[in-house]
Image (cartoon, rainbow, N blue to C red):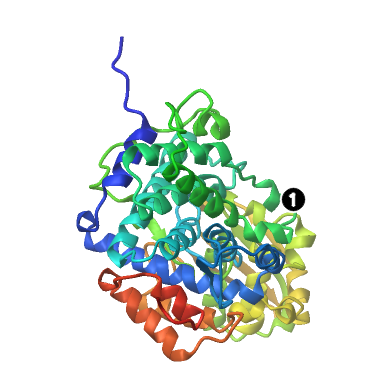
Amino acid sequence: MSERQPDIAATFAAYAANLTYEQLPAAVVSTLKRVVLDTLGTTLAANHLADGVQPLIDLIQQTGGAPESTLLGFGRKVPALMAALGNGGMAQALNYADTAKDAGHLGPSSVPAALAAAEQTGGVSGREFLASLAAGTELMARLSTAFRHAWGDWPVKPLRTQTWGYFNAALCSGRVLKLNASQMHDALGLALMQASGSMQIVRGGDPPAKNIYAAFPNYGGLLSAMLARNGLRAACDGIFEGEAGLFQLFHDGRFWRSPLENGLGETFYLLGVRFKPWPTSGVTHSLIEAALQLVARERLDAADIEQVQLIGGPDISHCSEPVEVRKKPSTTAAAGNSVFFPVAKVLANGGISLADFTPEGLRQPQVLALAQRMTYTIDAELGSSGIVLLSTADGRRLESRADTPLGDLANPMSYEQIVAKFLDCARYAAQPIPAENLQRIVELIDHLEQVPDVAALPALLSNLETR
């Protein structure tokens, strides 16, 4: 008989419980700091801009409870679980947060839960916080690789950030709460009991609820960690690889084991995270970049553009259909998941920003008219590259191709660009945040390993006194 392989959940539970800041390479620390800054910014931007956020925040504020953790940007403290729910819902509500290849969004499924737990606990240092984020995000990044290599063509049924985010948030918040390895295993078992998420919310027209899907794994992950701390046993064999475990439940049992075990603590898959320069699905970014190149080198008047053809790989299909919704999006969710809307914005305005996702921005007549003159084509050989072809009234036929748009690992956003993005996002906070507070946030995160209590971050973002 072959020797039984180590249980994946037990391996990660021990890893998360024992990981220390000192074990993190400098590149990991630097990346995680950017994840924190970026996630806080996208959360603030969603305060007002994202459809679906207000009903969630209203419910949380109506529920009441102990003032433990901050609703970012609103200047109010609520129970930690409710803060994880609300901040998680906002973090990815504009499709603007970080993304890791095939892994979904690492920051939105880790930072809200971990920060809520840290505020409730008090005295959680920046070093402890960084180690906590490393534990969960590394699991999530490795899960993506395990699935991708087993499937080849990606199955689109599960909503990755939501489904895997339960385990990410459970480990991150569990590490903040100082769970031991056995309790971490319990937390992963409790996360499996809740894990859910379906791409149908995207394929079915992007109703506003799609925006807040990261609320659920943050709430569920933190709940799992809290229950494990309180002694609820849920550890069992095969949480991931068992006959009814995560892989079997969502992926027909197909996965590649190697990335889930090899080099753990030495090779960090979370370093594959990318930061978005535009608040849209990452699969549209090559097309946006191609359109920006056209605008930079050609004199274009949107009214003179007769036809536009967008060519991309198979991944753009869900951002192209249903065509009538993608060409005339009525919600920020539908606009962020459209190939037509952002390209039309670039060709009409010379660029795209958060202002384009306000109610007025969604209704810009020139953009909507141009989108109606667009078609799309799938070319499987393009992969993640994008091509924009257009014809003008004066007979010109123009073409632009982008292979590595800004934000790609081969063309990453600079630290200065990420800071500028954070400051722009903060302009949309529910309560105005003083400029000196925002600058202080940037400084604190840049030196997060020296911060004695990360509760200083949400306090500054809500213009509250630190403890």
Q: In the rendered image, which quarter contains the N terminus?
A: top left
In the image, is residue 391 above or below residue 301? above
- Is residue 259 in view from this perspective? no
Residue under the point 51% across and 34% down = 246
Residue furthest to the left in view is: 22
Question: Residue 180's x, y, as percent?
Answer: 32, 43
Which quadrant holds residue 294?
bottom right
Question: Residue 117's x, y, as percent?
Answer: 44, 59
Question: Residue 347's x, y, as percent?
Answer: 63, 78
Which quadrant holds residue 50?
bottom right
Q: Amino acid at mark 1?
A: Gly
Question: Residue 84's x, y, as percent?
Answer: 53, 60
Residue furthest to the front in view is: 66
> Which residue position is annotated with label 1?
204
In the image, is residue 77 above or below residue 195? below
Residue under the point 31% across and 36% down = 261
User: 354 or 221, which is in the foreground?
Assistant: 221
* 220 sits to left or right of 48: left
In the image, is residue 158 above or below residue 369? above
- Is residue 211 in view from this perspective? yes
Alpha-carbon neighbours of circle 1 within 10 Å: few (<14), some, or many (≥20)?
few
Which quadrant holds residue 196?
top right
Secondary-structure class at tag 1: loop
Residue under the point 30% across and 66% down = 125
Q: In the rendered image, which quarter contains the C terminus?
A: bottom left
Count the marks: 1
User: 61 or 450, which is in the foreground?
Assistant: 61
Residue under the point 60% across and 72% down = 46
User: 223 or 193, which is in the foreground?
Assistant: 223
